[in-house]
Amino acid sequence: MPIDIAIPSGRASTRKLSGEQVFFTALAASLLLAVLIGFGRTYYFRALLPSQATVLPPSPLVHAHAMLFSAWILLFVVQTSFVAAGRRDLHMRLGLIGLPMVLSMLVVGTLTGLNLSKRLAGLPIDPYMMMALPLIAMVGCAILFLTALALRRTPGAHKRLMVLGMAAMIGAAFARMPFIPFLIGAFFLPNIYTVALIAWDLVTDRRPHRSTLLGGVVVLSATVGILFVWQNPVWLAFARWASGLVA
């Protein structure tokens, strides 16, 4: 059923939200909520909660990573809200900062992933194995976000690929939720966004959108695919070599 909302344009008027706008706005809200819940204990509300011996204090690089990726999720939610409110003009203007932000995220995210071997040193876990999570996720994000930006004038593909790009990186938030097992949160739950998009496509178009299927394969590779890589000797050798680049 359509929903009345006020258009943020300074005039007294309302417009109808379509089912599609409600759907994508709900996806954006769920992603923001996942980030707040997942990183609340370990970062956002860390100072307000009892200290956790298993959580290392954030380094300057981790702070930069957190601020940049937090700004991105907020931008994603705002951009989705602009579309829902019918302000595609604002959506297009603000979207100009999308490419530089994505490129910055790729650099900072990769450096943070390479630095993981130092942060996990001394803990009962193989740091080179764990490096697969952020580094492979960054590859998935790069493919999806850059393709989405290239297809920004094709709304159907653009918005689906943006959601799937967020899904490729949201595993880190799910994995930190205290009530979700690490393996399920990190590797499997992000794919629920692909399932949601396929279900939406089937309901509205009776067939999955091509960008949903292709993007879903990328998300699957950047999440579940890690399980087939992270203990491989070739990966471990590469991770040791790559971490030495930032030593």
Image (spheres, rainbow, N blue to C red):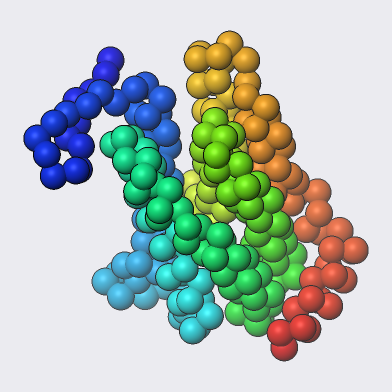
For residue 147, say whether it is visible.
yes
Residue at 13%, 31% in the rendered image: 13
Image label count = 0
Q: Residue 206: x and y, percent?
A: 58, 11
Q: Give the farthest residue toward the bottom.
A: 247
Q: In the displayed structure, would residue 67 be above or below residue 75?
A: below
Q: Residue 120: x and y, percent?
A: 63, 76
Q: Give the farthest residue toward the top.
A: 206
Q: Quadrant of the C terminus?
A: bottom right
Residue at 49%, 46% in the rendered image: 180
Q: Give the farthest residue toward the right.
A: 234
Q: Residue 123: x and y, percent?
A: 63, 76
Q: In the displayed structure, would residue 55 be above or below residue 2?
A: below
Q: Is residue 135 left or right of residue 73?
A: right
Q: Is residue 146 left or right of residue 34?
A: right
Quadrant in the picture for residue 198 = top right
Judge by depth and name the residue closer to the eye, 110 or 49. 110
Judge by depth and name the residue closer to the eye, 122 or 64. 64
Residue at 69%, 63% in the rendered image: 135
Judge by depth and name the residue closer to the eye, 202 or 15. 15
Q: Quadrant of the N terminus?
A: top left
Residue at 75%, 78% in the rendered image: 243
Q: In the displayed structure, would residue 233 be above or below residue 38?
A: below
